[in-house]
Amino acid sequence: MAYDALRDLCDQIGGRTSGAVSGDRAEDWAARHLESSGLERVRYESLEIPVWERGSLLAEVIAPQPRPLNALAHGFAPDQCDVTAPIVDVGCGLPEEYDRIGELARDALALCDETAPPGKRNPHRTERLAWAVERGAAGLIIAGATAGCLPRTGVCHRNGSPIPSIGLTAEDAGRLRRELEAGVRPKVRIRMTNTTRTGTARNVLADIGGAEDRHEIVLAGAHLDSWDVAQGATDNGIGCAIVLQAARALMAVGRTPRRSIRFALWAAEETGLRGSRQYVSAHADELGAIAAVMNFDMTGDPSGYWLPGVSEPPRLFRDLAQQLAPLGMRPEFTSQAALHSDHQPFMLEGVPIVGLNGPLPESGGGRYYHSAGDTFEKVSQPALCRAAAVAAHTLWAIADAPELPIRRLSRQAVRRMIARAGLTEAVEADTA
């Protein structure tokens, strides 16, 4: 069972960095489990990537009341730095908040939330870092949104940040802000050493060959890598388990669908969607044959379908929602585009995306995202089983449908979809 495989991934491998030894072990784990399902052509596709590995971090208030800070360096923070500077509060770290404080941000450590004001798009930490660099900040500190003294990590730059960037606990950030409100401007030191090198990672792929339109592919994927500080159970061991369980279930059907189904466990999602981007680049001439991409990333109890760019849900998905109601599915569909997971490179090329609505509960992955708390016991086995069952039914329905349920979007349609979601600036920043 995939739940047992997930336990093994969490407890025996744990945090897994693509391009490092832990990433190699995870990729071999993935291939072994895909092979045991009886899938065709289990294989690796290698890619060269920059590999960032965490070293030491000292974060402390040195004045007016010296004390340590509980923090984690963000991915691709500098290999070496030692910065001491005063704190400035930039709210949510949006450009207009830097405009509000003007030159105060220059040569200061910018402290911001990881959330956004009501009605505003919540930017990725890479965007927040870019704005801090533009305004001359000496460093960026992103406060965690949930209590529990758990700092969060995550990529802040796709290659190498020019300034230090760290995740800070909500509690430490709250105290710094109380001091600022009292008219005291704390001075903080950040000293870190990390390692950046070039390495090799591997996407792990396997197929169920189609009976008729074999060249057409329904692709089911999840990212295999995680951050090093935890077991990576909900982000994204759970997605890997869904893919593996769906593969095993579909192999047990005993017959072959009209189209092929491809299962992919992606490398290096956490450091810039590198595995899925490489696949899209290497298989550019095959993208037109992809009937749909399903991506599973921190998937919780399924409740509906996400069909970005689709204004009217096709009959196939309305029927599926009704048929799968005993598993929690409802005829509820969302269509607004979103970024920052492995569906993104495909979506920007117009490939149809089919996702499951079902965020993890705050008591599970939502609370422990990118922190040391993301461990195996946070995974709900019943929710995982329901998600895997819905995934398997959906993959088969698309693969066996007489006609493709969703057509590929033109470049103009993709641009309109991105603009409607308010993501144009985010896409431009991500592809710069």
Image (cartoon, rainbow, N blue to C red):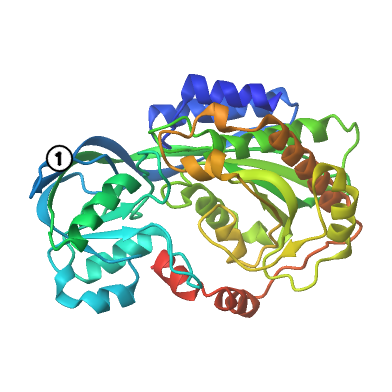
Q: Is residue 240 above or below residue 177?
A: above
Residue depicted at 32% across the width and 77% down the height: 96
Q: Position of residue 125 (x, y in %)?
A: 37, 58
Residue depicted at 47% across the width and 69% down the height: 427
Q: Position of residue 45 (x, y in %)?
A: 54, 40
Q: Nearer the viewer, residue 4 or 272?
A: 4
Residue 248 visible at all: yes
Say whether residue 405 is left or right of residue 20: right
Q: Quadrant of the C terminus?
A: bottom left
SS category of the residue bearing label 1: strand
Q: Quadrant of the N terminus?
A: top right
Q: Nearer the viewer, residue 212 or 226?
A: 226
Q: Quadrant of residue 396?
A: top right
Residue for badge 1: 67
Q: Position of residue 363 (x, y in %)?
A: 55, 40
Residue depicted at 92% across the width and 57% down the height: 402
Residue depicted at 82% across the width and 42% down the height: 327
Dot 1 crowding, Cα within 10 Å, few <14, some 14–19, many 20+: few
Say whether residue 152 is left or right of residue 226: left
Q: Position of residue 135 (x, y in %)?
A: 21, 71
Say whether residue 348 is left or right of residue 86: right
Q: Is residue 177 above or below residue 201?
A: below
**Label 1 sits on what residue type?**
Arg
Say whether residue 208 is left or right of residue 72: right
Q: Quadrant of residue 132?
A: bottom left
